[in-house]
């Protein structure tokens, strides 16, 4: 195998695996570069206790192969990390993808030399290609807060997104968790079971819905397999790529008891579907407040200590304007005598000492293990760390100095022949990821085939990119989403990151229609240039 290819794909998670499969099917010379020593992406790295998907297993999977759908058996309603990783390993083997991937190969830079992309890797190798496709995920760049004294900590500390493969021994030890996003909310109940004492350092109280995870019965699994054609149709027509339809019930018009009963049923069913139980939950502040208040009442009735319940009650952002977690016994965990909650908004972490965490008030929390469930430099972070340089040496970091800007989340002006799977400005994290990934991969496979057939290079025009940025902003502003001031959707979780609403909030089906229209019209948002003939 030579190092000069038609396409290099960076990353071998859900996106990279399918991209390689699709391009190989078109007879295109493609190779994947993956920093990890195996496939899996997010599910390779996020091995923290309790790591589990918030989408249900029967649709958190590929739809491109009917045979794959039928032959794979999921064991639970929500797939755990190890099971998803096994699934992706199975996909890699079943479609013979590993021979097209170099593992333990970290990209350190990639530059457009006027004719091709030149990709350098940490091991000193160089790859060249005509098209570069990033499949680096949206949540792969760990955000470890810059807290003074961390290096002095005498215990061990870990970010959940870089969890050691051999696990972390917390049995009987004093464990601290910083962060109560989806990750912290999954990890906290599991860590509490094993730890001697668990201290949760919470900056923002979060809404959470019970997941109601359970084993998947053979009957349920067979039912899904028989229904896949209909399930996929609903997903394609949906706002979020999930196979359920948002209710049209106007809760504002319902009597109190009926509204309460509706929320109770949604709470009992559990999962992200709670969000779809009423219409306009992300558009109408009054509807949202009803849903928010219902969840607050559940926190009050679950957590026995009223002060702890109040500290756990979110009041600074509407429900679902930050990514809504789903949980197994999250709020119940605070009833344990060996779990304490520390409000670090009221009393911020001042420093890490050799013995633990010291707060601004001087209060000390002795710890043996410190877990950062502090999230990621989302969406733009994974692309920025690739060291991309486009035309005339333009660095992505400079192009994005005011915030990430793309056309359709698929390409960046000034970066020819670069395609970004689930890039900023696409629905990505607001959807069921495999659905958005497959839509992008199919679209990119088509554009690459088109460019190859007509011997063209392509990059978004600045005008199309500017129009798309306006549309992404308008789509977010039509919802309550921008109201969550500290949301990673806005980049607000990373100090110094420009505040730009990153994912496209206009809905998956609508977005897919716009991407299809772009292709059918011959890619008017892209400057298409005939290839320079090299003598
Ligand atoms: P999130 O959703 O970004 O959550 C990170 C949490 O860590 C959140 O509670 C943050 O509080 C907290 N945090 C971050 N930095 C600090 C500092 N410096 N001090 C205290 N607390 C801090 O990441 P997750 O990994 O939970 O979830 C990411 C996505 O992965 C998830 O939504 C799914 O899509 C999968 P804040 O809210 O910013 O005040």
Image (cartoon, grey):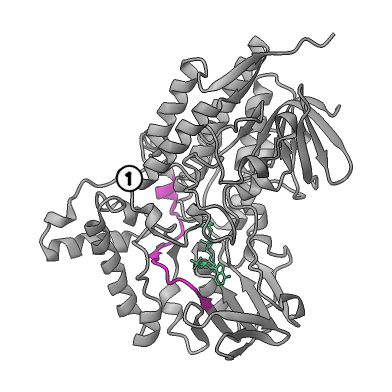
Whether residue 138 is situated above or below residue 484 in the rendered picture: above
To which residue does mark 1 refer? 478
Q: Is residue 222 visible?
A: yes
* Vertical arrangement, residue 436 with respect to residue 482, above or below: above
Q: Residue drawn 48% across and 49% down?
A: 57
User: Does the stretch in magenta take in 212?
Assistant: yes
Residues rendered magenta in the picture: 201-221
Residue 229 shows in the view: no
User: Residue 497: x percent and y percent?
Assistant: 58, 55
Which residue shows up at 62% across the image and 21% down it? 458
Asked whether, in this view, residue 167 is left or right of residue 102, the answer is left
Q: What residue do we see at 50% from left, 20% from top? A: 519
Q: Is residue 230 left or right of residue 218?
A: left
Number of on-image labels: 1
- Dot 1 alpha-carbon crowd within 10 angstroms: few under 14, some 14 to 19, many 20 or more: some
State the image coordinates of residue 212 (x, y, percent, origin top left).
40, 63
Locate residue 443, reporting x and y percent: 54, 26
Whether residue 416 appears in magenta in the rendering, the answer is no
Of helix, strand and loop, which mostly describes the magenta segment? Answer: loop
Q: Is residue 493 above or below residue 353?
A: above
Query: Where, by quadrant of the figure, is residue 372 drawn?
Result: bottom right
Q: Quadrant of the N terminus?
A: top right
Q: In the picture, which quadrant includes the C terminus?
A: top right
Q: Determine the residue positioned at 56% across, 46% down.
A: 403
Residue sitting at the far right: 124
Residue in front for this viewpoint, 307 or 273: 307
Quick one: SS at disc 1? Answer: loop
Dot 1 beta carbon under 8 Å from ligand 1: no
Q: Position of residue 238 (x, y in %)?
A: 36, 38
Q: Which quadrant would residue 370 be assigned to in this image?
A: bottom right
Q: Is residue 533 above or below residue 1?
A: above
């Amino acid at each position: 195998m030579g190092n000069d290819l038609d396409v290099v794909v960076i990353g071998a998670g859900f996106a990279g695996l399918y991209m390689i499969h699709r391009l190989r099917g078109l007879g295109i010379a493609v190779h994947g570069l993956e920093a990890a020593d195996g496939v899996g992406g997010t599910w390779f790295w996020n091995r923290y206790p309790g790591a589990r998907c918030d989408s249900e297993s029967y649709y958190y999977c590929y739809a491109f192969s009917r045979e794959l759908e039928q032959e794979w058996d999921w064991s639970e309603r929500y797939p755990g990390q190890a099971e998803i990783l096994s699934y992706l390993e199975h996909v890699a083997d079943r479609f013979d993808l590993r021979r097209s991937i170099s593992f333990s190969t970290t990209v350190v830079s990639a530059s457009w030399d006027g004719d091709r992309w030149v990709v350098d890797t940490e091991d000193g190798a160089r790859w060249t290609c005509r098209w570069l496709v990033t499949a680096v995920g949206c949540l792969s760049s760990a955000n470890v807060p810059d807290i003074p004294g961390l290096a002095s900590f005498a215990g061990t500390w870990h970010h959940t997104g870089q969890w050691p493969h051999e696990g972390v021994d917390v049995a009987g030890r004093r464990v601290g968790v910083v962060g109560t996003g989806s990750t912290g909310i999954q990890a906290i109940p599991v860590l509490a079971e094993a730890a001697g004492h668990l201290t949760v350092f919470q900056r923002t109280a979060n809404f959470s819905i019970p997941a109601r995870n359970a084993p998947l019965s053979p009957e349920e699994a067979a039912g899904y397999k028989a229904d896949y054609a209909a399930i996929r149709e609903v997903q394609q027509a949906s706002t979020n790529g999930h196979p359920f339809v948002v209710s049209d019930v106007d809760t504002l018009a319902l009597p109190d008891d009926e509204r309460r009963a509706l929320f109770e049923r949604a709470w009992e069913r559990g999962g992200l579907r709670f969000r779809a139980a009423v219409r306009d939950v992300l558009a109408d502040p009054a509807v949202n407040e009803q849903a928010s208040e219902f969840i607050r009442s559940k926190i009050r009735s679950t957590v026995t200590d009223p002060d702890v319940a109040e500290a756990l009650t979110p009041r600074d952002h509407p429900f679902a304007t930050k990514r809504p977690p789903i949980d197994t016994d999250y709020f119940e965990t605070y009833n344990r005598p060996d779990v304490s909650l520390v409000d670090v908004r009221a009393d911020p972490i001042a420093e890490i000492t050799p013995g633990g965490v010291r707060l601004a008030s001087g209060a000390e929390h002795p710890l043996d293990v410190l877990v950062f469930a502090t999230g990621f430099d989302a969406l733009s972070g994974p692309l920025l760390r690739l060291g991309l340089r486009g035309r005339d040496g333009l660095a992505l970091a400079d192009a994005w100095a005011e915030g990430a800007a793309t056309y359709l989340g698929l390409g960046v002006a000034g970066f020819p022949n670069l395609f970004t799977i689930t890039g900023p400005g696409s629905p990505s994290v607001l959807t069921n990821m495999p659905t958005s990934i497959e839509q992008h991969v199919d679209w990119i496979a088509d554009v690459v085939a088109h460019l190859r057939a007509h011997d063209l290079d392509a990059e978004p025009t600045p005008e199309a990119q500017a129009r798309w940025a306006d549309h992404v902003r308008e789509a977010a502003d039509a919802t309550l989403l921008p109201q969550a001031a500290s949301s990673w959707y806005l980049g607000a979780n990373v100090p110094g990151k420009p505040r730009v609403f990153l994912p496209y909030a206009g809905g998956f089906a609508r977005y897919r229609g716009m991407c299809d229209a772009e292709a059918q019209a011959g890619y008017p948002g892209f400057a298409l240039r005939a290839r320079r003939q090299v003598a």
